[in-house]
Amino acid sequence: MEFLGSTTGAPIGNTQLDDPLLRPSLFELIAQDKMRELLKPALSYALHVYAQASPNRTTLALVRWQDEAFAALMGIVELHHLTSFSASFAEMFYGFKRVPVSKKTNWKKRTALKLSALQIIASTLVAVALPYVRGKLSELYEEVRIEATAGGAASSLLGDDDEESYEEQDDPLGGQDTLEDSLEMRAQKRFRRTFLKLYPYVNGLYHATTLGYQIGYLYSLTDNHSPLLHLIGIRVVRMTMKDMREQAANTERMRATRGEILSALLGQPNNLIRFIRLLSQLSLIGASRALDALRTALPLSVFFFRFLEWWYASGFHKRAGGAAGITPPPPQPILPHPDGTPVPEDPTLCPLCLKKRTNATMLPTGYVFCYPCVFRYVSDHGRCPVTFASVEIEKLRRIYAVSA
């Protein structure tokens, strides 16, 4: 990331935001958005593996509430990055930053402005709360849609029945029908029916608006690739080498300050106030180090997750396990049933008609018959005539002979 300013030719000194060198390409912005979306399945996979390895109440609770846990974790990470670096986690990885945009401020002053507290909170909500809400709404829509297509109450949910028959349905939970329960059920069904009709349009409008902004950004018709960033009043630009050096200096200055405070506390006499201050400083240092470690751990989790997807999709994991090149032994033959059709000594004869096989057909049990003979037998009895094992018509397999 530190070489980005040099490779793109971005100046090191003061730069105006209208400089095309500071304008990220649309594909870079989409890539950093996709990276944020890949964090959740990567962490979810790691959580499920850990829960299977050591199942307990804590891990099971995390698996059950993984959406909420992920939102809380990303909220802390995004808030830390926006406060410290004026960039989200993914933007920081790609060497971008967020700057406020105000028509009342000229271009030169905008580069020096920092995000306001309101913009930081709004950016955190857009990066964390909005995907969480959209995910829950999508789950609710799928639940209602499946319920609507399952039959029974689904027909009234879709509005196929008239209002009177819709309201006269029995309580699906059972019990006595009271006025309060009837009104509650009626309101819930109306809400679900309205949600089922409106959600696709609202969701489609959101994606269409985002697509419109991306096309406008691609042709330099707008400064934002996202309508939400436009509403917040910020835009994404490249970080210059000067920004990176300032961030590194600020980080070192903050660590030195905390170290000085910690040294001063260690030199004070022992008392409860000293202990509380010392504990708080150690907690801040530990939290800062943990958040800094996540800057490396989270991208690595995405790359590891994508590697596992490729590994298991390619089939290389079977070769690595030593299974490649080793032919497994054939299964043991199924012995004939005592009351089954006897097998003739001549392997070219059909056990049913005792004539030379025509259009040879094999059953899953391994025995071969004439196709007309075995088709009629399996259709009537549903089993192998020799072993009496259950067989379906779809399991018949024709044997093709290769002529010399």
Image: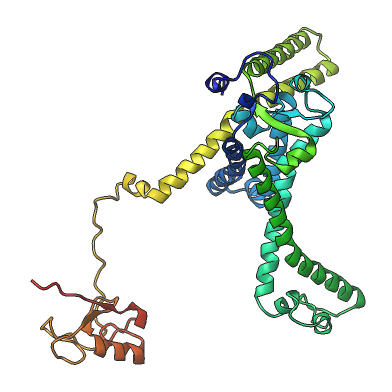
Instruction: Look at the picture and state if 208 lies above or below 360.
Output: above
Residue 159 in picture, x, y percent from top left? 76, 77
The number of callouts visible is 0
> What residue appears at the point 79 percent right and 22 percent down from the top-left corner?
106
Question: In the visual, does 337 lie left or right of 401?
Answer: right
Instruction: Look at the picture and state if 376 lies above or below 78.
Output: below
Question: In the visual, does 168 lie left or right of 313?
Answer: right
Instruction: Looking at the picture, tell me which residue is in the foreground, 272 or 354.
Output: 354
Residue 391 seen in render: no
| Corner quadrant of residue 136 | bottom right
Residue 193 seen in render: yes
Residue lying farthest right?
179
| Corner quadrant of residue 195 | bottom right
> What residue appears at the point 63 percent right and 50 percent down from the top-left corner?
63
Question: In the visual, does 379 lie left or right of 272?
Answer: left
| Corner quadrant of residue 301 | top right
Instruction: Looking at the picture, tell me which residue is in the foreground, 100 or 166.
Output: 100
Question: In the visual, does 110 lie left or right of 387?
Answer: right
The image's colouring method is: rainbow
Instruction: Looking at the picture, tell me which residue is in the foreground, 387 or 289.
Output: 289
Residue 389 in picture, x, y percent from top left? 33, 81
Residue 349 in picture, x, y percent from top left? 14, 86
Residue 320 in picture, x, y percent from top left? 33, 44
> What residue appears at the point 78 percent right and 11 percent down from the top-left corner?
265
> What residue appears at the point 33 percent right and 78 percent down from the top-left corner?
395
Instruction: Look at the picture and state if 7 lies above or below 397.
Output: above
Instruction: Look at the picture and state if 98 lies above or below 277.
Output: below
